[in-house]
Image: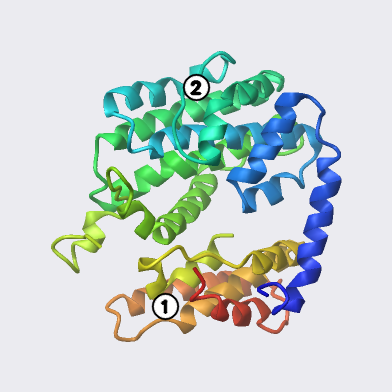
Amino acid sequence: MGVLSRPEEVPALLRLKLAAGRIRRQIPPQEHWAFAYDMLQRVSRSFALVIQQLGPELRNAVCVFYLVLRALDTVEDDTAIPNEVKLPILRDFYRHIYNPDWLFSCGANDYRVLMDNFRQVSTAFLELGEGYQKAIEEITRRMGAGMAKFICTEVETIDDYDEYCHYVAGLVGYGLSRLFHATGTEDLAPDHLSNSMGLFLQKTNIIRDYLEDINEIPRCRMFWPREIWSKYVDKLEIMAIGTCAICYNNVKVFRGVVKMRRGLTARVIDETKSISDVYSAFYEFSSLLESKIDDNDPNAALTRRRVDAIKKTCKSSGLLKRRVMIWRNQCTECLCWS
């Protein structure tokens, strides 16, 4: 009933499904590539849709890059692995990607399947061009070292928060920029832009996954810095701008996982075709967030300034479209969905 109750989302879902079907027919027939793209679909929802829109050579490189970092993240996320075992694996993971015989079983569900069959990812990696391999190796090495640092260090301050998010997400931006540059068709993007976008995505995910992280078994994890939450309590027990707008001032974040509906995600992807669409989407979701600001919140004024800055940037582009706030109106109804 979910999709049928929102018929305006059905065309976008169908178009994405058809596009994904066309792309699947272009996947190389070898076992390792079939595994890689099947696993991409299973461990990612939004990224898989975007990656499969790329040309074949770059698509293969980005697919492998994503799976390598997803496997590295699986090691970091598995709180059942003793630190004396986990730390050397994180630090040396960039070496393991060159060895199809390497195996380390961890994680759960599809993530365990990825780890148990990581040889398939390594085999695909070894078929990439040298420029792609070096970019993936560099980012994997730096990310693994950063993850290892924060296994032993709590996220206490906002600077810690930014540094952690740089390692686990900002470096993804660096890597993608290097992969696109390796095609010879694009200039290398400035690192500060790649890092800024990565921090935005990761901080949104940390907000969204707050409850899941603190309920992690056998040990909870905390990525939200003490410098922020300690202002309010002595002890804490308890497609990105859209998710941020949905999560903002939403008590459901503390009770379950809050996500954009699949149909709404499909519409955002389907209807965002140009930079004008991007500015319009940011403006609409920022307006949604703004509408939820509580004037009694001690951070209300600061939040309004941040939102105003985003909206001003969108307006000054001169590319905003005149459109009904379709996504915004649809989003307000999925605030309680979890």
Looking at the image, residue 22 lies above or below residue 285:
above
Colouring chosen for the image of the structure: rainbow
- Drawn side of residue 153 relative to residue 108, left or right: left
Rendering coords of residue 180 (x, y %): 69, 37
Q: CA distance from mark 2 to mark 1?
A: 42 Å
Q: Amino acid at mark 2?
A: Tyr
Residue at point 52% right, 25% down?
138
Q: Are marks 2 and 1 in contact (CB under 8 Å)?
A: no
Mark toward the start of the polypeptide (2 vs 1): 2
Q: Amino acid at mark 1?
A: Arg
Quadrant location, the N terminus: bottom right
Q: Residue at x 69, y 79 (%)?
A: 5
Q: Residue at x 81, y 42 (%)?
A: 24
Q: Residue 266: tell me if it is visible.
A: yes
Q: Where is residue 199 shown, x and y percent of the image?
A: 45, 51
Q: Say which element carries label 2.
A: helix
Residue receiving disc 2: 94
Q: Which residue ends up furthest to the left in the rendered image? A: 234
Q: Nearer the viewer, mark 2 or mark 1?
A: 2
Residue 284 location, x and y as percent? 60, 76
Q: Which residue is mark 1?
A: 304
